């Protein structure tokens, strides 16, 4: 069983649609709403604990994103420890989202955290273990 706490941000025209219900109906995922709110700009934010098989979890997240929902992992994030990084580039070969990329002509490895899907593939691929999984301290509702 795979389980994560997610922050979902719904665009204002999608707030009243039963998008989350499809996680159970179509992807056999169990969810528990920990918090939910409509922000002043009318976009919706919900914090959910979602559980199920890893495959269904990935498919469910893909579905949410296709509906325009921004999905964030509430419990952990990936950081690069710049003191340990040697710019070897090994992580860029495994990163599926382009969050890690070689900047030319400097040949420096850049990390764009906004593109990171927290798949953790870069963690074991990094020889000096510069990519670290850390608990996130982000506030749920800004
Ligand atoms: S966790 Fe995944 S998406 Fe994020 S930087 Fe590492 S390989 Fe790329
Ligand atoms: S694999 Fe590690 S050391 Fe190499 S560029 Fe990526 S983060 Fe830096």
Image: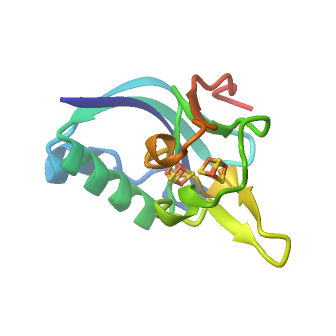
Residue depicted at 34% across the width and 45% down the height: 20
Coordinates of residue 93 in the picture (x, y in percent): 50, 65
Q: Position of residue 129 (x, y in %)?
A: 57, 36
Decide: is 71 above or below 34. Answer: below
The quarter of the picture where the N terminus appears is: top left
From the viewer's perspective, is 12 left or right of 29? Answer: right
Count of picture labels = 0
Image quadrant in which you'd find residue 77: top right
Identity of the residue furthest to the right in this view = 106
Residue 97: x, y in percent? 52, 64
Up/down of 11 relative to 33, above or below: below
Q: Nearer the viewer, residue 140 or 44?
A: 140
The quadrant of the image that shows the C terminus is: top right
Q: Quadrant location of residue 104?
A: bottom right
For the point 61% across and 58% down, the residue is 115
Residue 8 drawn above or below residue 116: above
Q: Nearer the viewer, residue 49 or 67?
A: 49
Q: Which of 80 and 50 is in front in this view?
A: 80
Residue drawn 70% across and 54% down? Answer: 111
Q: Residue at x 43, y 48 (%)?
A: 121
Left or right: 75, with 43 as reference point: left
Please indicate whether residue 111 sits to the left or right of residue 68 in the image: right
Q: Position of residue 116 (x, y in %)?
A: 57, 52
State how the image is colored.
rainbow
Outermost residue toward the bottom in this view: 105
């Amino acid at each position: 069983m795979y389980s994560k706490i997610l922050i979902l941000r719904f665009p204002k025209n999608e707030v009243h649609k039963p998008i989350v219900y499809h996680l159970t109906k179509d992807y056999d995922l169990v969810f528990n709403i920990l918090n939910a709110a409509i922000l002043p700009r009318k976009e919706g934010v919900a914090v959910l604990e979602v559980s199920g098989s890893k495959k269904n979890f990935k498919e469910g997240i893909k579905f949410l994103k296709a509906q325009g929902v921004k999905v964030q992992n509430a419990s952990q994030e990936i950081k690069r420890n710049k003191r340990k990084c040697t710019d070897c580039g090994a992580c860029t070969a495994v990163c599926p989202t382009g969050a890690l990329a070689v900047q030319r002509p400097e040949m420096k490895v850049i990390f764009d955290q906004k593109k990171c899907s927290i798949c953790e593939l870069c963690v074991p691929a990094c020889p000096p273990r510069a990519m670290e999984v850390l608990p996130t301290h982000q506030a749920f509702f800004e």
